[in-house]
Amino acid sequence: MKTGIELIAAERQRQLSVHGFDGERDAQYTHNQLVSAAVHYALPGTAHGGRFWPSTWAARWNQKGADDRIAQLAKAGALLAAEIDRLQRATPPTET
């Protein structure tokens, strides 16, 4: 059985290799779209009515209903990892 971090890493790799959601594409999402989508997947059920799904993203990319809870959380984690990577690339390194 894979650990949570392994599932998140595998999901992020799937996003990169299958869908081409790489750093260049992620760089476009400067208005918290990656975080919003992560929240959408992280919240259980549909009580939030999809209000966190980024309005600029096609509804067809929202796969929450097709996934079990573990897959939803792995997607949420992978999206957060993508946002962390995006922020690190966008922030120039500081000299210490």
Image: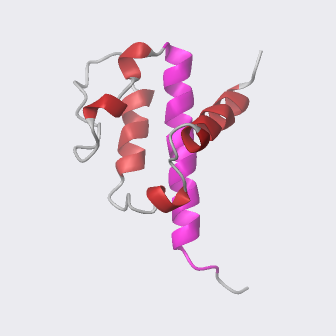
Q: Compared to 93, does 70 lie above or below?
A: above
What span is in magenta?
68-93
For this view, does 62 lie left or right of residue 59?
right
Q: Compared to 55, does 68 lie above or below?
A: above
For this view, does 43 lie left or right of residue 50?
right
Q: Position of residue 16 (x, y in %)?
A: 58, 44
Quadrant position of residue 43: top left
State which quarter of the image contains the C terminus: bottom right
Q: Which residue lies furthest to the right in this view?
A: 1
Q: Please name the predominant secondary structure of the magenta segment in the image.
A: helix
Residue shown at 45% from the left, 62% from the top: 27
Q: Where is residue 94 in the image (x, y as percent from the top left)?
A: 64, 83
Residue shown at 54% from the left, 21% from the top: 71
Residue shown at 52% from the left, 64% from the top: 87
**Would residue 95 be visible to someone looking at this image?**
yes
Q: Where is residue 3 in the image (x, y as percent from the top left)?
A: 74, 24
**Would residue 44 be visible to someone looking at this image?**
no
State which quarter of the image contains the N terminus: top right
Q: Where is residue 91 in the image (x, y as percent from the top left)?
A: 54, 74
Q: Compared to 81, does 96 lie above or below?
A: below
